[in-house]
Image: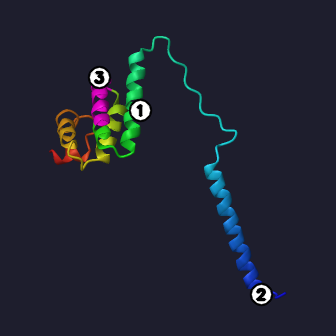
Amino acid sequence: MRRLSKRTQLIASFATGAVVSGVLLTFAMNSPAAGVTPPGKPARAAAAEPFIAVAQSRLDLLRNQAASGDEFSNWALSNALLDKFDLTGDSDDLYEAMVWVDRRSDMYGNQELAARVIDRYCGHRVVRWHWFCILGE
């Protein structure tokens, strides 16, 4: 039997360790999480209207589709969030709408959204320094 040099043994052990680590990580990424419980849903208010739940589920569906690159869903989500901001005045809705508008600023339908933002929202603190509003000055 031929004896390997110390350098060759060191390289072989390093390579074996790297392969074993890669295999373990691959199995860990593809296996279901054990012992992890999903976060509990918050308790629903007794007076919660079903309309709010339907609207929220519609927004969640649009978010998922827009995140996967669907341009129409991006446009629809942006409009829905701007409409929701008009109704509630919640700055989070305006901010999220602007995030989705910025994601696809090259999209043709966003010209309509840009005009809407410039006309209605440039005075709001969330949008005041957005490039739509700075260019519109």
Q: Earlier in the sequence, mark 3 or mark 1?
A: 1
Residue depicted at 74% across the width and 74% down the height: 13
Q: For the residues labelled 1 and 2, say whether their Cβ atoms are less than 8 Å apart.
A: no
Q: In this view, does 5 lie above or below 33?
A: below
Q: Which of marks 1 and 2 is nearer the N terminus?
A: 2
Coordinates of residue 93 in the picture (x, y in percent)? 35, 32
Disc count in the image? Answer: 3
**Quadrant of the rendered image containing residue 70:** top left
Q: Is residue 43 above or below residue 135?
A: above
Label drawn at residue 5: 2
Which residue is disc 1 drawn over? 60
Name the amino acid, label 1: Asp
User: Gap in Å between the C-alphas at discs 1 and 2?
Assistant: 61 Å
Magenta region, residue range: 76-89
Front disc: 3 or 1: 1
User: Gap in Å between the C-alphas at discs 3 and 2?
Assistant: 76 Å
Which secondary structure lies at badge 2?
loop
Which residue is disc 3 drawn over? 87
Name the amino acid, label 2: Ser
Which secondary structure lies at badge 3?
helix
Residue 74 relative to residue 134: left or right? right
